[in-house]
């Protein structure tokens, strides 16, 4: 055995020297803006300067600065049809990656995803998933960064019901997007399911496209509905823009701070102020900045290094009067 080892020892030594000799050459030094040269189409979702869309956009912009890709931005006014048309346009331009929402659903978006991957474009989603496409193309880079929508809706409504002491038969008003295609509508479904589990009477109003694009357009709708249903105990606004407008809605309807329990999605400067003033009782924070930032990281990792798609849950926590002071300064600059 000793003799055999003696014969092998020169080979072991040579292999060790070879390994030592090549380690320096193979090591990858940290590189600034390592995604330089990659062209990305990025979708903040809403109107330029709009609530939630701005947080996503800020995440995109920080990733653009940190990583170095060339980015084209598409603003879609929260309109699934407009967004789908813009996605098709982005595919036609031959970009390297697309970071967008799955608002239009699988039936409409799936063929565009197929076309994108046929052309070598990394397609990934944020906020609203396309589960079938993700399952098919995850090895090629299709990922998702966001909060699972049904679970987020169910969690918010459950928490609101517990905090407000909601009882069977009491009224709640849900203002949402149940009719929207794909995974997005499931968040509203989750809200409704949680309230119905308690036995509450759910008054539902679909957000029309005018209010979807500009929350102020929904003020008259809110005032009319609350006037017709004065016993509503909880209001859930399933929309970042509408949540940011709660103070406006409440005052227009003649409601005092705390008279109705308002719960909603996504922080903003106005939402933080409404919490401090007592109009907004509860907000679930999806951390949309991360949805923008990390979806761009996803594309760069795949395009540069061949990594598979990331699947990241950005659901943060509940924000209320007890902890809003920690979040408000970041909400003011649209990071949180």
Image: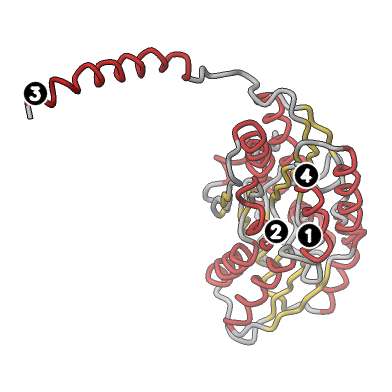
Pointer 2 residue: 133
In front of the other: label 4 or label 1? 1
- Spatial separation of the CA atoms under disc 3 and disc 4: 72 Å
Residue 149 vertical placement versus 189 (above, below): above
Q: What's the distance in space between the residues labelled 3 and 2, CA to CA?
A: 60 Å
- Disc 2/disc 4 C-alpha distance (Å): 24 Å
Counting residues from the start of the chain, the first of labels 1 and 3 encountered is: 3
Nearer to us of marks 3 and 2 is: 3
| Residue under label 3 | 3
Residue, disc 4: 53
Q: Give the image quarter of residue 172.
A: bottom right
N-term-proximal mark, 2 vs 4: 4
Element type at marker 4?
Answer: helix
Of the numbered discs 2 and 1, the one sitting upstream in the chain is 1
| x then y, percent, for residue 94 | 85, 37
> Tag count in the figure?
4
**Mark pair 2, 1: CA separation:** 6 Å
């Amino acid at each position: 055995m000793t003799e055999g080892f003696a014969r092998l020892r020169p080979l072991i030594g040579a292999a060790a020297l070879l390994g030592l000799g090549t380690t320096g050459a193979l090591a990858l030094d940290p590189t600034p803006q390592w995604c330089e040269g990659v062209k990305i189409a990025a979708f903040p979702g809403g109107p330029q300067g709009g609530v939630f869309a701005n947080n996503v956009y800020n995440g995109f912009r920080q990733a653009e600065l940190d990583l170095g890709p060339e980015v084209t931005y598409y603003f879609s006014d929260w309109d699934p049809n407009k967004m789908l048309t813009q996605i098709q346009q982005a595919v036609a331009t031959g970009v390297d990656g697309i970071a967008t929402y799955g608002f239009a659903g699988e039936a409409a978006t799936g063929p565009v995803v197929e076309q994108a991957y046929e052309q070598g474009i990394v397609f990934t989603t944020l906020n609203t998933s396309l589960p079938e496409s993700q399952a098919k193309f995850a090895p090629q880079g299709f990922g998702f960064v966001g909060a699972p929508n049904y679970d987020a809706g169910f969690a918010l409504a459950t928490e609101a019901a517990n905090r407000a002491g909601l009882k069977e038969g009491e009224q709640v008003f849900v203002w949402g997007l149940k009719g929207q295609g794909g995974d997005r509508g499931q968040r509203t479904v989750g809200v409704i399911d949680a309230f119905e589990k308690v036995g509450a009477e759910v008054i539902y109003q679909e957000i029309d496209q005018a209010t979807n694009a500009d929350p102020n357009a929904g003020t008259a709708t809110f005032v009319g509905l609350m006037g017709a249903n004065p016993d509503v105990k909880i209001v859930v606004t399933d929309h970042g823009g509408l949540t940011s407008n709660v103070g406006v809605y409440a005052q227009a309807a003649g409601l005092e701070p705390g008279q109705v329990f308002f719960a909603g999605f996504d922080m903003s400067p106005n939402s933080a102020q409404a919490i401090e003033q007592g109009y907004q009782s509860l907000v679930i924070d999806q951390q949309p900045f991360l949805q923008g930032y990390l979806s761009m990281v996803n594309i760069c990792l795949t395009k540069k290094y061949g990594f598979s798609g990331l699947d990241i849950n950005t659901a943060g926590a509940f924000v209320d009067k007890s902890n809003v002071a920690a979040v408000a300064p970041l909400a003011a600059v649209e990071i949180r």
